[in-house]
Amino acid sequence: FHPKHGYFPELESFCKASGFDEALPTVGVLFYGNMHFDQCQSVLKGLLENLFDCNTVPVFSDGIHNLQAMNKFFFRKDRPIIDALVNLTWFRLNGGPLGGNPEKTRELLSELNVPVFAPACMYSRKIEEWKASETGLSPMESIMAVIWPELDGCIEPIPCCGVQDISVGELQASEVQALPDRVERIALRIRRWMELKNKSNAQKRIAIIIYNYPPGEANLGVASYLDVFASVHKILQALRDNGYRVVPPERELHRLFQDCSVFNTGSWHRAEDALQNCFSLNLREYMSFFSSLPESMQKEVIESWGEAPGKVMVAGERIVIPGLEMGNIFLGIQPARPPLGEADLTSASHDKTKPPHHQYLAFYHWLQEIWKADMVVHVGTHGLAEFTKGKEVGLSNECFPDLLIGSMPHLYFYHVVNTSEVVIAKRRLYATTLGYNSPPFTTSDLYEGYAELEDLIDEYSQSRQHGDLKADIVQEKIFKKAGELKIEGRDVPGIHDELYEMKRRIIPKGLHILGEIYERKDLQSFFEFILRYDREGIKSLNRILAESKGLDYDQVLHNRESFVEVLKEIDRIASHLCGLCLEKSVDFAVMESGISSKTREELRETLSYGLDFLEKYSSNDAEITGLLRGLEAGFIEQAAGGDVIRTPDILPTGRNLTQFDPNRIPTQTAMQRGQEIAENTICVYQEKDASYPETVGLILWGFETTKTGGESIGQILSYLGVRIIRDAGSWAPRLEVISLEELRRPRVDCLVNICGFFRDMFPNIVLLLDRAFNLVAELDEDTEKNFVRKHSLKNKEDLKSANLDERTALKMANGRVFGPKAGEYGTRMLPLLEDSIWKTEEELAEVFIQSMDHLYTENLHAVKSDELYRANLSRVELVSQVRDTHDREIIDLDHYYEFFGGLSRAVQMEKGEPVRMLISDTTEEVIHTEDVARAINRGARTRLLNPRWANAMLSHEFHGAQQIADRVENMLGLAATTHSVENWIWSAIAERYLFDREMNEKLTNNNSFAAAAVAERLLEAEKRGHWQATTEEMEKLRAVYLDVEGDIEEGLNRE
């Protein structure tokens, strides 16, 4: 159907009537017929008017048979006729609300091979509500109009229409109307994408953007588990080989940037240093752009950052655009927030209450309007443009991310593990994301004193077996060595178990490089690791081998101290069989296994399962080919993200990364595992306190929920004594109360702390949890058996005394889900710790509370509720969080100290006493719950202090030392918020990286700025009282720091 030409039953008659011109680009539009036909007309007409210089093929469908309609009208003689597709329907493309086979959708879209745009159609939200809202779309519209279309590979959810009240005579009515400026933006972006198909590669201008966050020389090119400079070099080579006008530099990129003084504001360089090698914008040019912005945006920028040109990366009256041009490729550095001062205690990198500064605006304006980029490619997880001020989803023309990216097509390389923050880039910066792999994995193994301790245990075992009298002497040596190494263990088997856990712990091996082909050894490691775990319908290799020996594998795992030697032998045989499988074949490995014929079929099935994924893992070519396909404006297939070992079916990488379907959360498996986590935490808590914890404080993250299917959700529901019931054909699950008789313990209350990513990804789960708390709070049960009811009654009394009406008091009293204000994503703690401007730990706790005291219920969205939040904090007796991925221990990610540590510190401040802090590790064969100190110690031993980990990191020029400095900073954050970083760790860090001459030289040669940062953090740890260093240690540390500073100054003088 075309508004000007009418209805057509087939393509040829439409093309004839509409004057279809094969020389022009063609846009297909899919919209609703039947009862929703009229609702689509306004936006359809707006799109067609704005795409006046293109062919358009508008096709309507009932929403159920979309694929049939697309097959009929978007192909001619089995060849696609469209260059872009616009989808104006809700839900998944195949099957409507209840969904159909997504594989059929993937096949059709791959055959079309065009970008598929899904503007956010607000068919039920009033335009005025949207304009006034900080959230943008409603929670249900976010799911139906944004999240579900993303699961098909659709991109760019820019709102295109909404509901407007109108008068029809004397009657009041409403209709769906287009949003003219948003439709114009959508059409312009579609046109820019299609231009990529028609331009030769030699003509295309590609802006590749890397990061320098936190600002300063040490962090140039930083990204999550990615060797950015090596990856960019691979990208440049691939572009050259495919006809793009670029000559990759002969010098290493990081040295080229250093030699040209191309950094964001740092400790050792000024903006003037970069001016002679970088582009810049003079004040007159900038003001011509800035004065064209809406007055409200200009006002916000000036109030936050002063009059143009501001003070960030300004040389005189010129704004520096940091980066280097290489033919038609611009390799630029995304602007960073300036370092904070003591007056900025409430600012944050993810704080959207502040707009981007002048240089930030100038940078992206210059890319689009002056350098005229055809495509922007952000490299690595993650930048900050997507976190600038504006609505959460469904952006207007007064949202800064929309302004920054403008009409530029956008590809974004994102770590496949991080499926929460990626959605912000997709929905707020209109990114088509390309998932990149984690680094190869290896085992921690044992080193130095730990290896010596294992030798002593082997000697002890042999002496015991032979009745040797020296066994007692060796045992004393074991206890002495274990004490030196700070290893806990009541007896030799306990110490042996600790070493076994450490030795086989899976750790990342350095950093990933885009398109990297893995070595044979790395392939075998991955093969072994994915076969450690039971899968649906597939037994783990280790389980098969244990059962072949007549063992109950579950019993062995739960009584590991007694079976360490057995488990070591099983690991050895498993590794041998995996090697045979790779060298020869599955059948050869099965025959050599020596197991009974009855078990051989299980073994064959398991090994074959592993080989299927190994093939997808072995090469990361799709990361580069995905980029090239995007630069040709082709369709990039959707893929979920996650932990490649835990969830290998996310492979191969290089596809359009999306979140997990929110309606499947929590999965049945996650509910079962969540129940186990809940019972584990209660048992560990009761080891020191015989009572039940009345309230548990928990953290909900988007990426943990996606990777685990919602284990933490299952944990919360288990505490409450509530189960989920999923009825066939129903969208939303029902909640069913478990009786106290069946539960056999009190209902434990929870204080749920969500990050902004979780809020945006899982609005349905926020509502589900609120219903669960209300359900349990209203049960007619003894308050000593129902702590939720007990605390809700107290909350209600307090709220009524604050002059709130009965209904509002009840809604708020039962609320237990708190998070950041609308439009914000994290707390404001990170910059305080990064820039070392905090003074007291109480200050950190207060910043956490002020960031997270917004209540989320079914009817209240981010309502500031400071007193209610503090009251709930004061009742928390246990803080719990899940560790869910092999990529990161608790020391590897700043968000652990930001949220887990921040919550713990806030609880302590409100209670006036320390709180129990437990980490539940769900990455191993058995879920293990432990005190946070033990989790920190393990992370330090297996990673930061481990030569295998350190040397793998330092094999990556410049970036390796960044990663080491980052972990040391995280240690300081954990020390400040949990008080659980033991003194020996600080001494060991200093000894490993600074006092050891060889390692010090490696670190400094890799990145002298990062080496200085390590020393600075150690000096800060001592100054703040977290490290009781000896006089000798401090003398050595100061001397090393002066040496590193001297190396830096010498290098700068050479420049």
Image: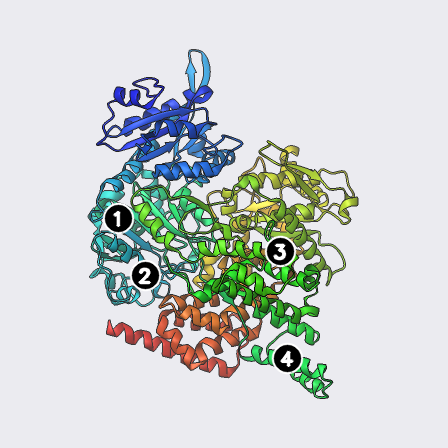
Task: Please report whichever mark, 2 or 1, sits nearer to the chain's N-terminal start.
Answer: 2
Inter-mark Cα distance, 4 to 3 = 37 Å
User: Between disc 3 and disc 2, whose residue precedes?
Assistant: 2
Q: Quadrant of residue 166?
A: top left
Mark 3 or mark 1, which has the lower sequence index? 1
Image location (x, y in percent) of residue 993: 45, 75
Which of discs 1 and 4 lies nearer the camera? The answer is 4
Of label 1 and label 4, which has the lower sequence position?
Answer: 1
Quadrant for the N terminus, please.
top left
Residue at 30% x, 61% y is: 263
Q: Is residue 917 placed above or below 63 in the rendered structure?
A: below
The residue under label 3 is 880
Write the residue at 34% across / 66% down.
Answer: 267
Q: Amino acid at mark 1?
A: Leu
Could you tell me which residue is drawn at 42 percent across and 28 percent down? 68
Binning the other alpha carbons within 10 Å of mark 1 as few (below 14), some (14 to 19) or many (20 upward) gives many
Residue positioned most to the top: 169
Separation (CA) of disc 3 from disc 1: 45 Å
Please give the residue where the numbered disc 4 appears in the rendered image.
458
Residue 825 position within the rendered picture, expressed as x and y whole percent measured from the top left: 48, 48
Marks 2/1: CA–CA distance: 20 Å
Number of the front mark, 4 or 3: 4
Q: Which callout, 4 or 3, points at the residue further toward the start of the chain?
A: 4
Q: Which mark is residue 456?
A: none
Q: Are discs 3 and 2 less than 8 Å apart at CB?
A: no
Q: Amino acid at mark 4?
A: Asp
Residue with the mark numbered 1: 367
Residue 214, x across and y down, in percent: 39, 60
Q: Are marks 3 and 1 in contact (CB under 8 Å)?
A: no
Q: Nearer the viewer, mark 3 or mark 2?
A: 3
Residue hosting label 2: 265
Asked which secondary structure carries label 2, the reply is loop
